[in-house]
Image (cartoon, helix red, strand yellow):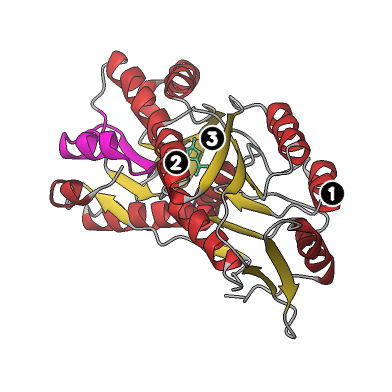
Amino acid sequence: MKKLLVTASIIALALLSFTGCNKKTETKSGEVVSRQTSNRTIKVGYAQVGHESAWRTANSSSFKTTMTPANGYDLIYIDADGNQEVQIAAIRDFIAQNVDYIVVAPVIETGWDEVLKEAKAAAIPVILSDRQMKLEDDSLYLCWVGGNFLKEGRDGVKWLEGYLDGKGLSNEDLNIVDIQGTLGASAQVGRTQGIEEGIQSHPNWNLIAQKSGDFRKDGGKKAMEEIIKEVGINKINVLFAENDDMALGAIEAIKAAGKKPGEDIIIITFDAGHDVFLSMIAGEINCACECNPLHGPRIAEIIKTLENGGSVEKIQYVDEAVFDQSNAAAILPTRQY
Ligand code: GYE
């Protein structure tokens, strides 16, 4: 993985950013470092996506329980309820309040250049958490930490290959439906690419429906109801649900249509939260590809490193595993979310 060597412009930004008791300087290698000259409260503005899923709730609480006054933080937390405009307004407000760091979990990938330029002009470092941004200039943010969504999607495909192989079904025709996350969110983009690659490389796999459920339980249920109406429940062999909440919503629609989730329809989901472990144990979900939401301590660690004069890697992927019915009961007691 590439070591973070932040460009001169960010360094200039960083040099300006601490007029109080903290100073940022540039090393010979060009890394951004900061020198803490006294203890201070660090003011962080966090522009959160919303509260659409259990994953998001766990993510929010990991920030709120980490960035406390007792730990030396003043956290300004904004829940944008899935609205990019609200996030942009929140970032502008953080700039006006002259926070020390801005953290953003961007609802979608595009449309951030302007406001990040404003943060840069105000010399406030921006850290991305969870989803990524597509920017014309990557020096507009300091670093990103989150899950590898394309790998997660590919992991789901690999699991399905192994499962079919184990059952001697690899050569059977397979009809797959994909319930997608919020369109344009990097978690959707990566996971959708993963399953689409899988469809491409298996001539006997057919993608018979693809619809967004916006990463919400009711969205997953509605998308599944519509798909069942369009293609007929008997045609569906596999549900690829791009997060847990949508899988759990879709299960309600599958049951209402008289089928057994996990038996009549193979279900693969993403996040691997507590409720999905219970569903795997109950036999209703087959596979969960993990996406770890506990970014609060990771971002705090990054900030601490910067405050202590260290450097951080630009792109930081979190390790993630794949679980299924064979190990769900044994693993559940070890889960933190
Ligand atoms: O999978 C989903 C949430 O961006 C990784 O957003 C995150 C996704 C997560 O709503 O449950």
Q: Nearer the viewer, residue 256 or 287?
A: 287
User: Which quadrant holds residue 44?
Assistant: top right
Which of these two is toward me, 319 or 149?
Answer: 319
Give the mark, 1 or 3, whose residue is nearer the N terminus: 1
Q: Is mark 2 within 8 Å of ligand 1?
A: yes
> Can you see residue 290?
yes
Identify the disc placed on residue 117: 1
Direction from residue 325 to residue 273 in the image, left or right: right
Disc 3 marks which amino acid? Gly
Q: Nearer the viewer, residue 184 or 26?
A: 26
* SS label for mark 3: loop
Judged from the image, the secondary structure of the residue bearing numbered disc 2 is: helix
Q: Which residue is mark 3?
A: 181
Report the amino acid beneath label 1: Lys
Beta carbon at label 3 within 8 Å of ligand 1: yes
The answer to whether 176 is drawn above or below residue 257 in the figure is below
**x, y percent for residue 228:** 43, 20
Query: Callout 1: helix, strand or loop?
Result: helix
The residue segment tinted magenta is 261-284
Q: Earlier in the sequence, mark 2 or mark 1?
A: 2
